[in-house]
Image (cartoon, grey):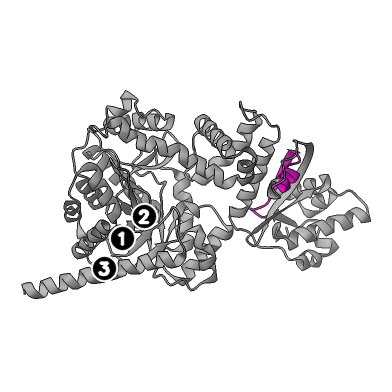
């Protein structure tokens, strides 16, 4: 039972505003992440863009509707369509969220948090194994931003995530912004989250912007990464080492150059964190 | 599974119905002022109709322009409440909008709304339809010759749609494009052929004979039967071959096969 990390460097999301740039080729990014559902069972321009991007750089497929935690049976149509896309694109990474978003065949199109219970651990771990079997490869599960927790919770979120990853033998996509948002909303220490996740399971980072709505932080993906999240990212790099990192910007998507600049900033932050860590180690020895 | 199933049943119902204060749901959720359980559930329940609205909005720009943003939002809410989303992709949410409008829901009784939604949906679906099949070269059709041609067959490309309309929505869309006042609904029965050539979507009216031929192609009928849709005699044969050639050039046809 093991997870093999592939470090792709620093990438950006493939969003429709930038399709002409990608079709033209030569976008200077190390890799791209595409929302799986935007390309499943589809063709035409969207798929042509994805295939063109794939010819140029590695691609990660990131799902939003697997609904791994629902008590519904796994959606066979979803798995079939995702498998077909995976076979066609041969992505470097396939991921989705540790959440639920459907019930009795209806979708809410949101990433609802799981109750952190032993029952849910067993349920999700079993389903992740089924998905990995259906896809013929390992899946990475991402922590979501959340605005509620349940009275039934018996574990911390990081213990919940780590235990599922261990039992299902899957990877972890650690969204640093989501940790920050949830930490503020539920008053836990984000560093404790980082410390609680097994380093050998973390295969990807997400970074994004959020909004302060007064009583809570809201995950919006509509702006640059804030200073506190950059600091937490540096802490994550020190804890986990260099990990494929993506800037998520889904609303009010800026010009490509702005997005690429944010991605370069992440690369600089990673280098700085690793340099500091190296210095600390040299001093200690 | 009792705990997890009960939480998901109660929370989902509250979010979908837009009733975050539902005690059955909030009993599962932690929270204290200023963010009690209901306020926390509301963060999610407020998002659900917005997501459905945005998905419909993206796929129906002419309907938005005709109704205006306020009325379109009301339509999206009514449609979402009635049907919910049954597909993993939010992009599939608009599939039933035309049928919903065909029942003339309160406040949306303009008779051509259903046809407009249907046509916009066809254009969207054609744009994103899976690629598939090997394009048919016009020369390959000609090269079959009179012996092999009748038994050969071809398929319609996955992006092809045959849309039956009861109103003239094309004139309506042209008026909306030109920022002219929308014309009154004009009943007019027609069939339009929608297809994708490369990455662009096109549409033209299909005559009764063309529509019959296209349906026969869709059903996998041999080319002699497809051509018979145009009648008999040399002029009909010429019309049939001309239509097949145009459809081949425009990537309406794919997968030419001989038995």
Whether residue A7 appears in this view of the structure is: no
Between residues A281 and A135, which one lies in front from this camera angle?
A281
Return the residue at label 2. Answer: A95
The residue at which mark 3 appears reads as: A270
Observer-nearest of A30 and A42: A30
**Are dots 2 and 1 on a single chain?**
yes
Q: Is mark 3 on a helix, strand or loop?
A: helix
Task: Find the distance from the CA under tag 2 to the CA under tag 3.
Answer: 22 Å
The span shown in magenta is B156-175
Residue at the outermost top position:
B23
In the rendered image, which quarter is residue B94 located in?
top right
Give coordinates of residue A257: x percent, y percent.
Answer: 44, 68
Nearer mark to the viewer, of 2 and 3: 3
Give the class, few, some or many, for how many residues have Cα within 10 Å of label 2's Cα (few <14, many ≥20). Answer: many
Q: Where is residue B205 in the image (x, y as percent from the top left)?
A: 78, 48
Q: Earlier in the sequence, mark 2 or mark 3?
A: 2
Classify A50 as above or below B40.
Answer: below
- Quadrant of the rendered structure where residue B96 is? top right
> Which callout, 1 or 3, points at the residue further toward the start of the chain?
1
Residue A180 magenta: no
Q: Mark 1 — residue?
A: A204
Same subunit, tags 1 and 3: yes
**Mark 2 touching mark 1, by CB under 8 A?**
yes
| Rendered position, A240 above or below A96 | below
- The chain under label 2 reads A
Left/right of residue B20 with respect to residue B202 in the rendered view = left
Image quadrant containing the C terminus of chain A: bottom left
């Amino acid at each position: 039972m093991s997870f093999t990390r592939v470090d792709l460097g620093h990438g950006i999301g493939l969003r429709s505003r930038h399709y002409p740039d990608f079709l033209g080729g030569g976008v200077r990014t190390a890799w791209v992440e595409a929302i799986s559902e935007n390309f499943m069972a589809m063709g035409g321009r969207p798929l042509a863009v994805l295939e063109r991007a794939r010819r140029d750089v590695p691609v990660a497929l990131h799902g939003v509707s697997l609904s791994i935690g629902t008590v519904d049976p796994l959606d066979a149509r979803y798995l079939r369509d995702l498998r077909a896309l995976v076979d066609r694109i041969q992505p470097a990474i396939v991921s989705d969220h540790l959440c639920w978003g459907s019930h009795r065949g209806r979708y809410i199109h949101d990433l609802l948090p799981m109750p952190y219970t032993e029952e849910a651990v067993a349920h999700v771990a079993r389903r992740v194994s089924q998905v990995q079997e259906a896809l013929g490869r390992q899946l990475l599960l991402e922590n979501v931003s959340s605005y509620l927790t349940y009275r039934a919770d018996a574990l911390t979120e990081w213990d919940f995530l780590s235990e599922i990853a261990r039992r299902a033998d899957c990877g972890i996509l650690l969204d640093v912004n989501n940790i920050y948002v949830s930490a503020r909303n539920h008053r836990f220490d984000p560093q404790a989250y980082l410390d609680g996740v097994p380093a050998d399971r973390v295969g990807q980072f997400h970074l994004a912007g959020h909004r302060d709505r007064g009583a809570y932080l809201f995950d919006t993906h509509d702006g640059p990464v804030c200073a506190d999240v950059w600091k937490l990212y540096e802490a994550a790099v020190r804890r986990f080492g260099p990990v494929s990192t993506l800037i998520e910007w889904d609303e009010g998507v800026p010009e490509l150059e702005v997005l690429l600049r944010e991605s370069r900033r992440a690369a600089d932050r990673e280098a700085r964190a690793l340099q500091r860590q190296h210095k600390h180690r040299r001093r200690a020895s | 599974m009792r705990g997890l199933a009960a939480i998901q049943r109660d929370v989902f119902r509250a979010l979908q119905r837009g009733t975050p204060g539902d005690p059955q749901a909030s009993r599962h959720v932690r929270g204290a002022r200023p963010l009690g359980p209901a306020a926390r559930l509301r963060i999610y329940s407020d998002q659900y109709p917005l997501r459905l609205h945005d998905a419909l909005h993206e796929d129906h720009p002419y309907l938005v322009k005709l109704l205006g943003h306020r009325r379109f939002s009301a339509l999206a809410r009514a449609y979402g409440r009635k049907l919910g989303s049954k597909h993993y992709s939010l992009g599939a949410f608009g599939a039933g909008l035309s049928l919903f409008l065909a029942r003339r829901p309160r406040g949306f009784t303009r008779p051509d709304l259903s046809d407009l939604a249907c046509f916009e949906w066809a254009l969207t679906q054609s744009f994103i339809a899976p690629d598939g099949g090997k394009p048919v070269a016009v020369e390959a059709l000609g090269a079959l010759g009179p012996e092999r041609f009748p038994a050969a067959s071809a398929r319609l490309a996955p992006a092809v749609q045959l849309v039956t309309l009861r109103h003239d929505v094309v004139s309506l869309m042209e008026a909306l494009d030109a920022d002219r006042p929308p014309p009154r609904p004009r009943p007019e029965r027609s069939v339009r052929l929608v297809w994708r050539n490369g990455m662009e979507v096109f549409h033209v009216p299909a005559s009764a004979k063309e529509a019959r031929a296209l349906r026969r192609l869709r059903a996998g009928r041999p080319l002699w039967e497809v051509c018979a849709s145009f009648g008999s005699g040399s002029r009909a044969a010429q019309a049939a071959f001309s239509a097949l050639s145009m459809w081949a050039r425009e990537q309406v046809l794919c997968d030419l096969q001989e038995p």
